[in-house]
Image (spheres, rainbow, N blue to C red):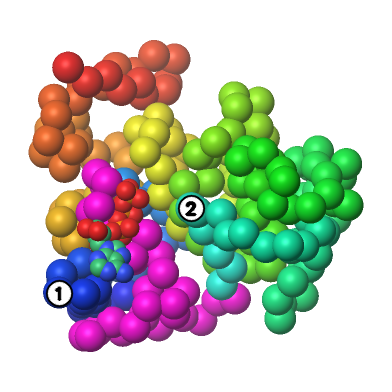
Amino acid sequence: MIVKGLKVKLGKKIVLDNVNIELRPGITLILGPNGSGKTTLLKTIIGMIEPIEGKVIVNENLSYSPAEFYTVNMKTIDVILAGRKKGEYQKYIELFNIADLMENDFQNLSSGQKRLVLIVKALGEGDLVIMDEPFANLDMKNRMIVLDSLLKLKSEKNFIITSHELEVINYADEIILVKNGKVVYSGSKENVSDLILSQVYDVRIRSLVVAGRRFFFHE
Ligand SMILES: Nc1ncnc2c1ncn2[C@@H]1O[C@H](COP(=O)(O)OP(=O)(O)OP(=O)(O)O)[C@@H](O)[C@H]1O
């Protein structure tokens, strides 16, 4: 997947401006403050939003799990199976321990349960899996289950994810920082300095490496 010179206007606002991305293998993490354009970027990559300039070149089979839940009057299993794409869902249903929810109405599930269902759907469908805030609403155990599955699957699939948790940097291969609709950093996690994170989020951020893991604090 390559993004070239992307410009997106929504209403009167230029939401993305000259965004260029060359996808690298593994887990790409997009970080940025509220309203910086992350969801718009993902929606433009999957073709839900039409750019006014630039293009997205996709050679992979894309799947998407949205940040926001849709309201549908459907059984959970039918939400997972809905859509054109064929998928391999059963192993993820078991891995995520959600088999008991399959006959329930999707709209009655808890937020965390809905999140797991939509992630399972996306994992079963694509080889480039795009997930908007996959860790939102998840408890610690389920967060670890999702993170572990990304790490296990990244040799066979690529991922683009967004998060508001800086600790997710530890699990990513490539980081993209977005601010005011522009990519201000794109590169390895090792080179993402506290200074650039502080500039992106407009708050002083420090990090500390303990046992090989980087922990983040803000003042
Ligand atoms: N349909 C729309 N019409 C007008 N402006 C929009 C529309 N959708 C989004 N925006 C604006 O575009 C900007 C980027 O929104 P987007 O949802 O992409 O941000 P985000 O980085 O995903 O934010 P968050 O972290 O809060 O989810 C925001 O200023 C938002 O208000």
Toward which corner of the image does residue 51 lie, by quadrant? bottom left
Q: Quadrant of the N terminus?
A: bottom left
Position of residue 84 measured from the top left corner of the image (x, y, whole percent): 71, 81
Whether residue 147 is visible, yes or no, is yes
Can you say whether 189 is above or below 184 in the image? above
Q: Is residue 39 magenta?
A: yes
Which residue is at a point 67% across and 63% down the rendered structure image? 72
Toward which corner of the image does residue 52 lie, by quadrant? bottom left
> Given the image, on which type of amino acid does mark 2 rest?
Ala
Residue on which the image places disc 1: 12
Can you say whether 47 is above or below 191 in the image? below
Residue on which the image places disc 2: 67
Toward which corner of the image does residue 78 lie, by quadrant? bottom right
* Residue at the top extreme of this rendering: 210
Position of residue 100 measured from the top left corner of the image (x, y, whole percent): 88, 41
- Give, as a single range, the part of the protein colored magenta: 32-61
